[in-house]
Image: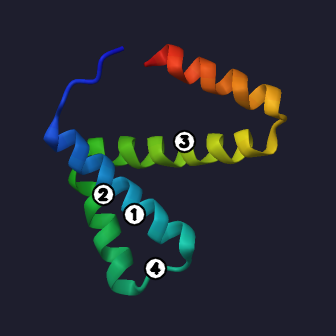
């Protein structure tokens, strides 16, 4: 599938990834937690993209734990989805 350039979607994906890393790395400060909540509430797209990043991270962690044969199969499957 060919990716369509969408600067807004790309920006949201970048923000979601940054929020995911901040949340994963430890407890957010009170100010960060308020900002994160405001960002999530700003658009359903923000929630969807944040969840997509979280699922992707989980899937990558599972892939790391699998055998090399299974990793190769995952790579082939991912390339097929492109």
* Residue 7, placed above or below residue 15: above
Residue 77, compared with residue 38, is above or below; it is: above
Neighbourhood count class around disc 2 (C-alpha, 10 Å): few under 14, some 14–19, many 20 upward = some
Asked if the residues shown at circle 2 and circle 4 are in contact, with their CB atoms under 8 angstroms apart, the answer is: no
Marks 3 and 2 close (CB-CB < 8 Å): no
Vertical placement of residue 78 versus 33, above or below: above
- The image quadrant that residue 42 belongs to is bottom left
- Earlier in the chain: of badge 2 and badge 4, it is 2
* Quarter of the rendering containing residue 3: top left
Q: Is residue 26 above or below residue 10?
A: below
In percent of width and height, residue 17 lies at: 40, 55
Q: What element carries label 4?
A: loop
User: Mark 2 = which residue?
Assistant: 15
Do the numbered discs 2 and 1 sit on residues whose CB atoms are within 8 Å? yes
Q: Residue 19 carries which label?
A: 1
10 Å crowding of disc 3: few (<14), some (14-19), many (20+):
few
In terms of sequence position, does the residue under pointer 3 or pointer 1 come before the other?
Answer: 1
Pair 2/4: label in front: 2
Contact, mark 4 vs mark 1 (Cβ under 8 Å): no
Asked if the residue at tag 1 contacts the one at tag 3, i.e. Cβ–Cβ closer than 8 Å, the answer is no
Whole-number angstrom distance, CA of label 3 to CA of label 2: 15 Å
């Amino acid at each position: 599938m060919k990716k369509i350039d969408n600067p807004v979607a790309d920006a949201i994906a970048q923000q979601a990834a940054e929020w995911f890393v901040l949340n994963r790395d430890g407890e957010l400060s009170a100010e960060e937690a308020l900002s994160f909540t405001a960002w999530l509430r700003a658009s359903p797209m923000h929630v969807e993209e944040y969840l997509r990043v979280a699922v992707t991270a989980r899937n990558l962690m599972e892939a790391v734990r699998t055998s090399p044969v299974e990793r190769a199969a995952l790579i082939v499957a991912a390339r097929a989805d492109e």
